[in-house]
Image (spheres, grey):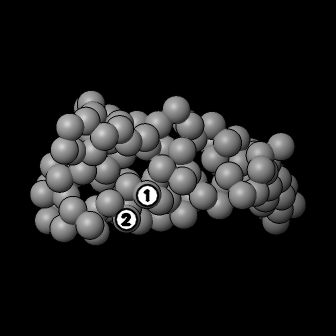
Amino acid sequence: MVQQADLDRAFAALADSNRRDVLQRLGDGPLPISALASAAGMTVTGMAKHIHVLEVAGLVTTEKIGRTRQCRLGGERLDGAMTWISYYQRLWERRLDGLDAFFTLQKGTDR
């Protein structure tokens, strides 16, 4: 089963649109924090705080190269979050299928 703390970190990291945008940008390849900050229209310090949240969740890694800090997608994928989401997706699908069957039966008896 997925560890709750891991899920909490992943969902907390993904809860912010700026952090989701960072992940999307890093999907094209590594970028320095300054480039990410510039693209988001925020300070480097502000972006560094977002990067830290993503690092704690394992979604991003950083490496100091010269005077810049390079960011790339981390090794932690969203498998745990996807497992959790898939479980509840299947649960709701079963419930909705049951509800659909109930209403189909109701229609048949109302004639």
Q: Residue 111's x, y, as percent?
A: 80, 62
Figure quadrant of the N terminus: top right
Mark 2 lies on residue: 49
Q: Element type at marker 1?
A: helix
User: Please, is residue 90 above or below residue 27 in the view?
Assistant: below
Q: Element type at marker 2?
A: helix
Q: In the displayed image of the protein, which residue is found farthest to the front?
A: 66
Left or right of 44, for residue 106: right
In the rendered image, which quarter is residue 77 located in?
top right
Q: Residue at x 31, y 40 (%)?
A: 64
Disc 1 residue type (three-letter): His
Of residue 6 and residue 63, the one placed in the foreground of this image is: 63
Q: CA distance from mark 2 to mark 1?
A: 5 Å
Mark 1 lies on residue: 52
Whether label 2 touches label 1, CB < 8 Å: yes
Disc 2 residue type (three-letter): Lys
Left or right of 11, for residue 31: left
Left or right of 27, for residue 101: right
Of residue 30 and residue 45, the one placed in the foreground of this image is: 45
Q: Residues within 10 Å of mark 2 (few under 14, many from 20)?
A: few
Q: Residue 67's x, y, as percent?
A: 19, 44
Q: Residue at x 37, y 65 (%)?
A: 49
